[in-house]
Amino acid sequence: MSQDNAGTAILDTPADAEKAVKQLQRAGFNLKKLSIIAKDYHTEGRVVGFYNAGDRAELWGQQSAFWGGMWCLLFGSAFLLVPGMGLVVVAGPMVTSIIGGLERAVALGSLGVLGAALYSVGIPRDYVPRFETAIKGDKYILVVHGTVSEVAQAREVLTGMGYEVQVHCAYIPA
């Protein structure tokens, strides 16, 4: 999943993330180029688990309904235990980057697995702590991958909804 351009937005709730994905879908954006990353939090006293049966993935946890919906829309899924963050759930092509990030984390030194994955899709090292902090704070990270025009289209849709979008590794006129 090597892309030269990425756009990112930090969303507060699963409802915000779902609304953003569905609005991008209505605008004709290719959902195979979207990723969502978040913690599955507040798992004390609850069964938490993940399984994949054929082309269907399921999660048991606080946000199972949200993630079930995202996995129906987005391509790829993972449920990971990330040191320092806890249980992290991912939907979309960032899954491949995170798996690759396991190898790159050692080479990149101070970046953890998630940071290395974000860095590998063009997010500057300086931005990584901001996204890691957002995930630790129970926020949702939406990552848009694609060409300059695709990232610009997604940015236009998301800023029209009131979300702040950061563009990485691309020049997109304001």
Image: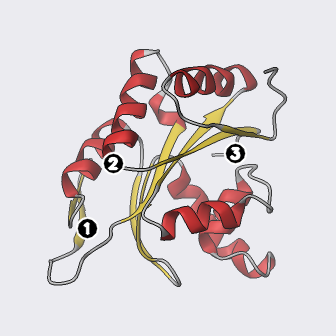
User: Picture quarter containing residue 47?
Assistant: bottom left
Q: Earlier in the sequence, mark 1 or mark 2?
A: 2
The spot of residue 79 in percent (x, y) is 37, 67
Q: Which residue is mark 2?
A: 14
Callout 1 amino acid: Phe
Q: Residues within 10 Å of mark 2 (few under 14, many from 20)?
A: some
In this view, 102 is above or below 70: below
Seen at 25% across and 49% down, the residue is: 66
The one of 39 and 117 positioned closer to us in this rendering: 39
C-alpha distance separating marks 2 and 3: 27 Å
Seen at 58% across and 68% down, the residue is: 133
Q: Quadrant of the C terminus?
A: top right
Task: Say whether residue 169 is left or right of residue 13.
Answer: right
Q: Which residue is mark 3?
A: 2
Q: Which structural element holds mark 2?
A: helix
The spot of residue 146 in percent (x, y) is 66, 31
Residue 99 visible here:
no
Task: Say whether residue 29 is left or right of residue 47.
Answer: right
Q: Which structural element holds mark 1?
A: strand
The spot of residue 170 in percent (x, y) is 81, 33
Q: Which residue is mark 1?
A: 50
Callout 2 amino acid: Pro
The one of 4 and 44 positioned closer to us in this rendering: 44
Q: Nearer the viewer, mark 2 or mark 3?
A: 2
Seen at 74% across and 52% down, the residue is: 123
Task: Say whether residue 111 is left or right of residue 68.
Answer: right
